[in-house]
Each structure stands twice: as structure tokens, then as C-alpha cells.
Amino acid sequence: MNLDQTRLALLGTGNMGEAVLAGALRAGVAPANVVATSRRAERVAEVAARHGVRTTLDNVEAVRDADVVVVAVKPKDVGALLTSVGDALAPHAVVVSVAAGLSAAFFEGRLPGRQPVVRVMPNTPAAIGAGMSAVSRGTHATDDDVALVLAVLEGTGDAVEVPEAYQAASGAVAGSGPAYMFYVLDALAEAGVAVGLSRDLASRLAVQTMLGSARLIAETGEHPALARERVTSPGGTTVQGLRALDEGGVRAAFIAAVEAARDRTNEIAAELEG
Ligand SMILES: NC(=O)C1=CN([C@@H]2O[C@H](COP(=O)(O)OP(=O)(O)OC[C@H]3O[C@@H](n4cnc5c(N)ncnc54)[C@H](O)[C@@H]3O)[C@@H](O)[C@H]2O)C=CC1
Ligand SMILES: O=C(O)[C@@H]1CCC=N1
């Protein structure tokens, strides 16, 4: 899809908003057709300088004429934002939510008319085009609307459409997932320091090992359990390391982490949607 005429408004250019913005520009949205907002003048100045896009503190001005409006403020700030911009949206404008928890119906209920809404759960590696997004359509979003959103997200990395009922679980795996991976990287590097490596060396070994392992699975399509077996020589070293991970309950801890993040997503929805 040719995006050079697509007009994009990004409401709330924080960590996630800026990552989506960077991806949209990589996908071919023209900087002159992008307007980004934030609450603070210093922040929009920073975003304008970094990405060469138009910025404003006025969300209503930002959404006028936009074809795609990305809402990237905290979930608690979404309701008031929608009330303020609703009347200024073009009827065809696709409203994209990246807010954890909030349903497409929450958006539809606060916007006048039959606004197309697409819910997206991205993650921060989107900033470098290595993100993963779960995408779900609202009641009024057409195939063309979803295709437009996927095209805009193209430069953020991979994206998959899922039923909205899977948003909380998808967010718990991929939306929060980078935090778990950074946690593992930090722990693995720290473990290297514990056995006498310098911090720089331990960190370099850990980062490339995580990157290479993920790429190996992505490129071969091999099941991780089989790939793990090929590292694990009988009577060798790895099996002892894996035994320690099992004794530490790491697999169960990952399940608990994902369940907790999913539950918190549903709790946010219950708190804000009633
Ligand atoms: N950080 C992450 O890894 C992910 C975040 N999300 C979602 O993205 C959204 C934003 O999260 P972050 O970027 O982490 O937060 P953040 O705090 O970095 O960014 C939010 C931005 O919105 C601005 N803002 C607040 N109210 C505003 C308003 N009325 N008008 C314009 N700008 C306003 C703030 O000044 C701030 O720059 C949340 O809804 C979160 O659930 C989704 C997936 C991953
Ligand atoms: O922690 C959060 O609430 C957001 C949503 C997914 C990742 N960060």
C-alpha cells in the first residue's frame, strides 16, 4: 500500500507513541503528513527535532484531516482524550488504540458516529523495526481499515491480527515481553559477572546469545525444545545449567508472570470501563 498520502495523527508521543511514529515513517508515511502531540512543550520539541514531523499540544487540531489517529496515552487518560477530539475526527478516520486493556467498544462508545477502531498491542522494539504487534478490529473497522493500519505498522516489525478476546494474553506475552527479556539479559549478564567475567564481556555474551537464539528459531522454525536438546550434550555442561533453572522454578515463574500481566490488563479494563 502506498502511504505517502496518508495523514497520521499521533496523540501522546511517549515511549510507545514515538516507537510507532518511527515505524510509520519507516513504512513510508511522509513526515510532512504526520502530526504528533504530547502534554509538554519540551517533549514535542524533542520529537519534532528527532523525526522532522509537525507537533502541537492541541489534540483537536492534530486529528483534523487525519486518516489514521493513533491514541498512545495511558489508559486512564484515554476517556477524556476521546471526548475532546471526537467531533473533530473525519468520519473515515481509523482510530488506533495501543492502550492496554481498553476494548474497541470503549472507544466506539465514546466517539460519535460509526468510527472505525483498531486495537493494537505493540511492543517497544517497534522503535527499531523489530517489534511484534497483536491487532484486533472493532465493530465498524473494514478489511481496508485493517489493511491500512497494518501498512502503517509495517515499519514497526511483525504484526498479526487476533480476535479481541486474545488481546490481554497477547499483550502479556509480547507487549510486556521485552521487559521479561531485558530481565533475563540483566540476570544472565550478572551471572557472568558472578563467575568472574567483566560486566562488558558478560553483557556482550548475553545479548548476542539472546539475539542469535531468537533468530535461529525464527529462521529455522524449529521448536525451541528441540533446539534446546541440540545444545544439551549427554553428561555435559548445559544439562546442569538447565537443572538449576528447573530447580529455580523459572518455567513456572514465566507462566505466573504472563498470567499476572494478563490479569492486570483485565483489571485495568474493569477499572476504566466499569
Ligand atoms: N511502553 C510499552 O511498552 C507499551 C505501552 N503500551 C500502551 O501505550 C500507551 C502509552 O504508554 P507509554 O508510551 O509507555 O507511556 P508514556 O508515559 O511514555 O507516554 C504517554 C504520553 O502521553 C502524553 N499524554 C498524556 N495525556 C495526553 C493528552 N491528553 N494529550 C496528549 N498527550 C498526552 C504524555 O505526556 C506522554 O508523553 C499506554 O496506553 C500503554 O498501555 C502498549 C504496549 C507497550
Ligand atoms: O506495562 C504496561 O502497562 C504496558 C502495556 C504493555 C507493556 N507496557
Image (spheres, grey):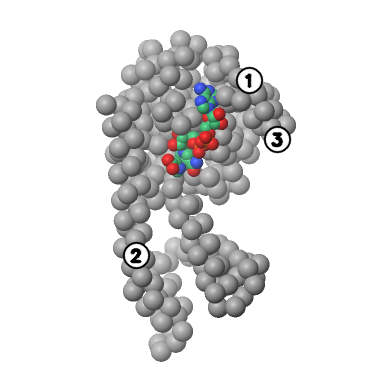
Q: Give residue 18's mark.
A: none
Label 1: state its secondary structure. strand
Q: Amino acid at mark 3?
A: Arg
* Depth order, front residue of 42/137: 42
Q: Give residue 251's mark.
A: 2
Q: Earlier in the sequence, mark 1 or mark 3?
A: 3
The CA span between labels 1 and 3 is 15 Å
Q: Give residue 50's mark.
A: 3
Q: Earlier in the sequence, mark 1 or mark 2?
A: 1
**Residue count near mark 3 (Cα–Cα under 10 Å), binned few <14, some 14–19, many ≥20:** few
**Residue count near mark 1 (Cα–Cα under 10 Å), binned few <14, some 14–19, many ≥20:** some
Q: Earlier in the sequence, mark 3 or mark 2?
A: 3
**Which residue shows up at 45% across the image and 55% down it?**
180
**Residue count near mark 2 (Cα–Cα under 10 Å), binned few <14, some 14–19, many ≥20:** few
**Which residue shows up at 32% across the image and 49% down it?**
260
Residue 6 at least partly seen: no
* Depth order, front residue of 197/210: 197
Q: x%, y% of residue 86?
A: 44, 14
